[in-house]
Image (cartoon, rainbow, N blue to C red):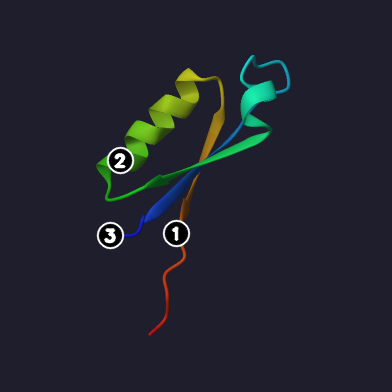
């Protein structure tokens, strides 16, 4: 099943993750529980999370 959401996070310039991850990290998420988990992971890493709906193909 394709992801229903993309959870993006902006990594601050002073974060130790910045050299490894770059400025923005995007994680796929499915359903309703998984985006909440991803938000927690990004906050724990010091990122500012943003949730967007994943694009869906039009039939």
Q: Which residue is mark 3?
A: 1
Q: Residue at x 39, y 27 (%)?
A: 40
Residue 2, placed above or below residue 10 = below
Residue 2, placed above or below residue 33 = below
Residue 8 lies, in percent from the top left, at 53, 41
The quadrant in which residue 35 appears is top left
The quadrant in which residue 53 appears is bottom left
Q: Which residue is mark 2?
A: 34
Q: Which residue is mark 1?
A: 54
Q: CA distance from mark 1 to mark 3?
A: 12 Å
Residue furthest out toward the front: 20
Quarter of the C terminus within the rendering: bottom left
Q: Is residue 19 left or right of residue 57?
A: right
Quarter of the N terminus within the rendering: bottom left
Is disc 3 in contact with disc 2, using a CB cutoff of under 8 Å?
no
Q: Residue at x 46, y 49 (%)?
A: 6
Q: How many residues crowd around disc 2 within 10 Å: few (fewer than 14), some, or many (20 or more)?
A: some
Residue 9 lies, in percent from the top left, at 56, 36
Q: CA distance from mark 3 to mark 2?
A: 13 Å
Q: Residue at x 64, y 14 (%)?
A: 16
Closer to the eye: label 1 or 3 = 3
Sequence-first tag of 1 and 3 = 3
Q: Residue at x 27, y 47 (%)?
A: 32
Closer to the eye: label 3 or 2 = 3
Q: How many residues crowd around disc 1 within 10 Å: few (fewer than 14), some, or many (20 or more)?
A: some
Sequence-first tag of 3 and 2 = 3
């Amino acid at each position: 099943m394709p992801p229903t959401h993309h959870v993006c996070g902006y990594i601050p310039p002073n974060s130790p993750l910045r050299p490894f991850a770059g400025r923005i990290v995007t994680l796929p998420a499915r359903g309703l529980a998984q985006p909440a988990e991803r938000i927690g992971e990004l906050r724990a890493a010091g990122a500012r999370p943003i949730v967007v709906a994943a694009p869906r193909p039009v039939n």
